[in-house]
Amino acid sequence: MTSSVAHGEIFGQESEIQQLVSTLLSSEVDGDNPVLVASVVGVGGFGKTTLAQHAYNNTRVAEYFDMRMWICVTDAFDESRITREMLESVSSSRFRHDSITNFKRLQVALRTRLVSKRFLLVLDDVRNNDKINLAIGHENWQKLLSPLKAAANGSKILLTTRSSMVAKMLQSAYITNLECLSDKDCWSLIKTTMFDDTNHLINSQLANIGSEITKTLSGLPLVAKVVARQLKFIRISQCTFKNALYIAVSSPRTRNLKLTVDLMWMAQGYAYPDGCRRMEDIGKQYVDELSEECFRIGGDEHRRIPSSVRHLSIHLDSLSMLDETIPYSNLRTLIFFTSRMVAPINISIPQLCVLDLSPCKIDRVLDSIRQCVHLRYLNISSTAINMLPEYLGKLYHLQVLNLSGCRLEKLPSSINNLVSLRHLTAANQILSTITDIGSLRYLQRLPIFKVTSEKTNSIIQLGYLQELRGSLHIRNLENIDAPNEAKEAMLCKKECS
């Protein structure tokens, strides 16, 4: 059993990934050995693992191999652990071989699984142990990998390593040496990590700062990601103040909140005096710049919404007078604060990440939502919606789905395609109808699970929900066929009660 592994964006290494994919898809063999070895070599932080992840997840690669395995090796060379992990990757059950402790028996079991199968094995972060010379290291690896020779021609081993000597020790037929990124590619990586979009419009001041930062990163993708995450944290911290401005920025009764935020920033040390300008003036400038991205429509005001707005809250009973003035294409957040009927929005909002329709009196999911491919948060709770469309399962980035209070009879069969989903809120009788719920492996809470004799609803499904926590009620335990099934639910490893 194999699955995809998480991977980040690739910048400046497009030709390397294409060449690597071509190598993995080649039918070339190494003499009598059906297994060909390819290596990605580079110092720490050069993006070796990310490159390997892209190759591993490539659609053509996934279809070409019968089995795929991903093993993290690192410093400790533990032949039994590595063999066991390979065996578990190609087995239908991750616990079937727990009782096997003998290394040779593990190898026999692995060989049996691989006979006449074409596999891809990724050995990530293989290092050279300074205490063992290369000859002994080579012998150890040859012994460990010997069961793989029973596989079919076209099988591949892809290893990532910091040492070219390790690549040669494992007799790599192809070696990809990674080099540092250009400043331009580093900046693209930073922008994508911060904004989830390389084309995100930013002001010239931030662009200049970013350009200066990239010059200090030595072209290391890992360092660029670390810097980007720190900048993103700062940006999120600023968004905390944006949320306060969200409500205050357009309301005459709370305009003094902008001054309060200004003074808070000054007290926190975010605003420094600049020549002849006071700290208060600097803080006001910061608040004004941030508030340009947030906008609130409410009351009797009918102001034109600036194109710079990214986060919009609406306190109106109808959008009929505003549809033509709202810059939908630029929005990232759209929140409604109304309990009356809202005119359907049939305008594509491709960059939308947050949509809250919970107070609205709507009875169907808006057709335009199918275009919101970047949507991460969808709240349609307490609406009159009684059926969800199948295309909802194509919102692969969705992390939060709130359906509480909806009059749903069932969920679409595509719901288990939401592989990024972390929080699903709905009535218990609705949640218990989800089949193959193990596909939602990042799900945090599941109040009820009903065991059936069907594989898609067996208790084994709970074993894939490794982040599950909170209260969990398991019903119909009489449908568990064997003790091993209960073991595979991994209940002892969950923070559930």
Image (tube, rainbow, N blue to C red):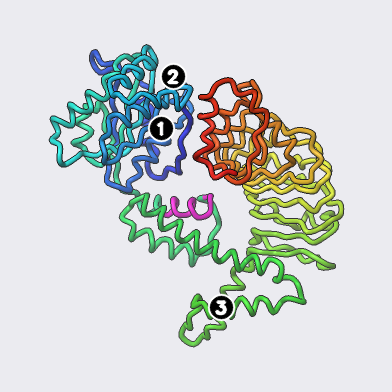
| SS at circle 1 | helix
Q: Is residue 226 left or right of residue 281?
A: left
Q: Residue at x 64, y 21 (%)?
A: 453
Q: CA distance from mark 3 to mark 1?
A: 47 Å
- Specify start and end residues of the magenta stretch as a single range: 187-197
**Residue 247 location (% of width, % of height):** 71, 67
Q: Amino acid at mark 3?
A: Gly
Q: In terms of depth relative to the viewer, which is nearer, 285 or 398?
A: 398
**Dots 3, 1 in contact, CB < 8 A:** no
Residue 66: give its label. 2
Tell me, yes or no, if residue 374 can be seen here.
Answer: no
The mark that comes first in sequence, 2 or 1, is: 1
Which label number is shown at residue 447?
none
Tell me the number on the disc at residue 283. Answer: 3
Identify the residue at image location x=25%, y=35%: 77
Can you tell which quarter of the image residue 475 is in? Answer: top right
